[in-house]
Image (tube, rainbow, N blue to C red):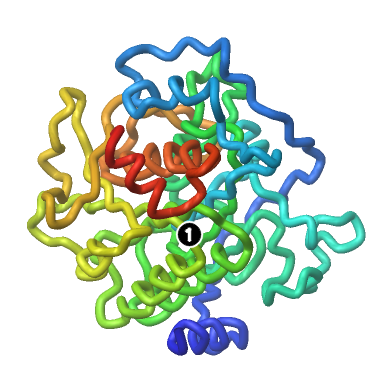
């Protein structure tokens, strides 16, 4: 825990934060009013991964809202998200402490959480409150998790948990990589930010090579998440077991962590997926995923990686977590293991 606190302090002071110059992020549209997604009339084919993970069978009971009316908050940590896509914009968590007309984009930490203007999350890579996706990876995965089916008839995109809410946290560069020194620090800070700001489930994307000598920072942050009853979903990786990131192996015995392998169109483990009883918690579909890429582009499985499988499991976890008596991260994990 002391290592995480030190890293966060250094990030806040700007001593070790990446804060790389980047493209100019598009502005965030504050003018939307979140409404519940309507999914009861959607036709989901039998071969659709949404159907395979069992989402439609749960939708009559829950679509991602808790019994008290609040939405299950999911942190998507990775490359950021294109928050200008209507189907994703309407799924976003809104930090009310920063979103008031008098305080939005005023370069101040109005809610006192240590970050300025973090309206929908935070960008630890660029050091600002606009975690836009210049890579594309987690715009796609976020749409599988919780897009609202706003344009389903035309685009065919719906998230597993369309009435959950997405907190967006970025630490990965536009080329999908990280700096060996600042990357692990920003990754740990991203996890700590998500936990501190109320995420119940974390989808955690990471560079294929892991975090090297500083991986303990990330592992420690994930351990702390478990102490706050936060479920963490992690892709198993894509080396066909030839090279599994060391930090992933460190997570295999944690009761609040789900490591997800990928399945092909025939329901078999992908040749490129890391897998095995001593590594992966469960497996989920990769093939035939339909989601968004930046620029409101709709694509079908633009990359065959375990990240897609982990996104489906993240959405399913949010559904289960919103059911009565299923609020525990460990209970949700066990429930998913028995049904997926």
Instruction: Decide: is 96 above or below 334.
Output: below
Instruction: Decide: is 266 above or below 75.
Output: above
Instruction: Decide: is 2 above or below 54.
Output: below
Of the pair 132 and 320, the residue shown nearer to us:
320
Dot 1: what SS? loop
For this view, does 235 lie left or right of residue 114? left
State the count of labels: 1
- At a point 37% along the width and 69% down the height, the residue shown is 178
For this view, does 3 lie left or right of residue 336? right
- At a point 37% along the width and 12% down the height, the residue shown is 45
- Which x, y percent locates residue 36? 69, 29
- Which x, y percent locates residue 243? 12, 61
Q: Quadrant of the N terminus?
A: bottom left
| Whether residue 24 is visible | no
Rendering quarter of residue 87? top right
Rendering quarter of residue 89? top right
Q: Which residue is mark 1?
A: 230
């Amino acid at each position: 825990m002391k290592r995480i606190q030190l890293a966060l302090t250094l990030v806040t002071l700007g001593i070790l934060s990446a804060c790389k110059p980047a493209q100019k992020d598009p502005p965030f549209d504050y003018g939307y009013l979140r409404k519940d997604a309507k999914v009861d009339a959607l036709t989901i084919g039998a071969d659709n991964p949404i159907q395979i993970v069992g989402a439609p069978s749960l939708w009559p009971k829950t679509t991602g809202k808790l019994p008290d009316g609040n939405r299950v908050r999911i942190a998507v940590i990775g490359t950021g998200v294109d928050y200008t896509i209507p189907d994703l914009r309407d799924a976003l968590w809104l930090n009310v402490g920063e979103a008031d007309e008098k305080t939005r984009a005023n370069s101040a930490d109005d809610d006192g959480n240590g970050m300025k203007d973090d309206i929908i999350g935070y960008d630890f890579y660029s050091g600002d409150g606009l975690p836009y996706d210049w890579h594309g990876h987690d715009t796609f995965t976020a749409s599988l998790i919780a897009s609202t089916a706003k344009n389903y008839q035309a685009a065919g995109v719906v998230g597993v948990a369309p009435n959950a809410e997405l907190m967006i946290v970025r630490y990965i560069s536009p080329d999908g990589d990280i700096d060996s020194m600042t990357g692990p620090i920003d990754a740990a800070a991203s996890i700590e930010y998500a936990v501190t700001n109320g995420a119940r489930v974390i989808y955690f994307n990471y560079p294929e090579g892991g975090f090297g000598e500083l991986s303990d920072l990330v592992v420690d942050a994930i351990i702390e998440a478990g102490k706050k009853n936060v479920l963490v979903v992690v892709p198993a990786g894509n080396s066909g077991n030839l090279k599994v990131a060391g930090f992933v192996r460190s997570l295999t015995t944690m009761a609040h962590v789900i490591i997800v392998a990928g399945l092909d169109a025939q329901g078999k483990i992908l040749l490129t997926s890391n897998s095995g009883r001593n590594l992966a918690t469960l497996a989920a579909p990769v093939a035939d995923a339909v989601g968004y890429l930046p620029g409101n582009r709709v694509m079908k499985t633009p990359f065959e990686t375990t990240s897609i499988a982990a996104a489906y499991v993240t959405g399913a976890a949010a559904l289960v977590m919103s059911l009565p008596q299923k609020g525990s991260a460990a209970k949700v994990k066990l429930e998913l293991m028995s049904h997926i």
